Amino acid sequence: LIIIVSAVATALVGGIIPKGNVTIGIIVFGVGMMLFTMIMGNAFAAITVMTVGIGYPFVLAHGANPVVIGMLALTCGFCGTLCTPMAANFNTVPVALLDMKKPMGVIKNQVPVAIIMMVVQIVMMILLK
């Protein structure tokens, strides 16, 4: 299943990213990690699919440092965790424990921080590649 999803991601993104442009590849990889984590609710599941489908063919195959890219891509995924109710232990449980009136209150407060962190992570990937 991971191979199929990765192949689909590679085919979709292959027409968007210019061949050999690592900077755009990093941006797509980071944003993709965040979005896919929001869908899955877990960055550890998203990193496998996104690295095989986008990270390797568009970033790592062109000489980027795999340690830097892998570490920062995973933290991009964690930015997605801050923005989704799928991550119940971070975003839904505190609402219940604190008896908050707004069920999305935790997420609304975390989204600006997640976006800022996302931009910082992508800039770091570009600078340290």
Image (cartoon, rainbow, N blue to C red):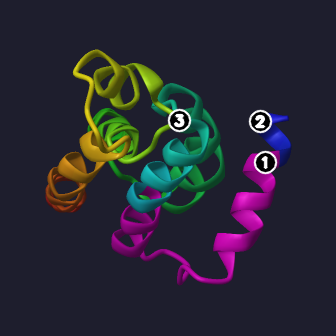
Query: Spatial distance from mark 2 to mark 3, Cα to Cα?
Result: 20 Å
The residue carrying pointer 1 sits among few (fewer than 14), some (14 to 19) or many (20 or more) residues within 10 Å by Cα, namely some
Mark carried by residue 79: none
- The residue where tag 3 is placed is 86
CB within 8 Å, label 1 to label 3: no
- Residue 86 horizontal side relative to residue 68, left or right: right
Q: Residue at x 68, y 82 (%)?
A: 15
Mark carried by residue 2: 2
When asked about the image quadrant of residue 91, the answer is top left
Q: Residue at x 35, y 51 (%)?
A: 64
Q: Residue at x 17, y 62 (%)?
A: 123
Q: Residue at x 36, y 43 (%)?
A: 73
When asked about the image quadrant of residue 127, the answer is bottom left
In the rendered structure, which amino acid carries the disc numbered 1? Answer: Val
In the rendered structure, which amino acid carries the disc numbered 2? Answer: Ile
The residue carrying pointer 3 sits among few (fewer than 14), some (14 to 19) or many (20 or more) residues within 10 Å by Cα, namely some
At mark 3, the secondary structure is loop
The N terminus appears in which quarter of the rendering?
top right
At mark 1, the secondary structure is helix
Is residue 47 magenta-colored? no
| 110 or 92, nearer to the observer | 92
The picture places residue 122, in percent across and down from the top left corner, at 24, 59
Task: Of the two numbered discs 1 and 3 on the same chain, state the one appearing first in sequence.
Answer: 1
Vertical comparison of 78 with 6: above or below = above
- The residue where tag 1 is placed is 5
What range of the chain is rendered magenta?
5-29
In the rendered structure, which amino acid carries the disc numbered 3? Answer: Met
* Residue ranking furthest to the top: 97
- Residue 44 horizontal side relative to residue 16, left or right: left
Vertical comparison of 21 with 45: above or below = below
Is residue 20 magenta-colored? yes
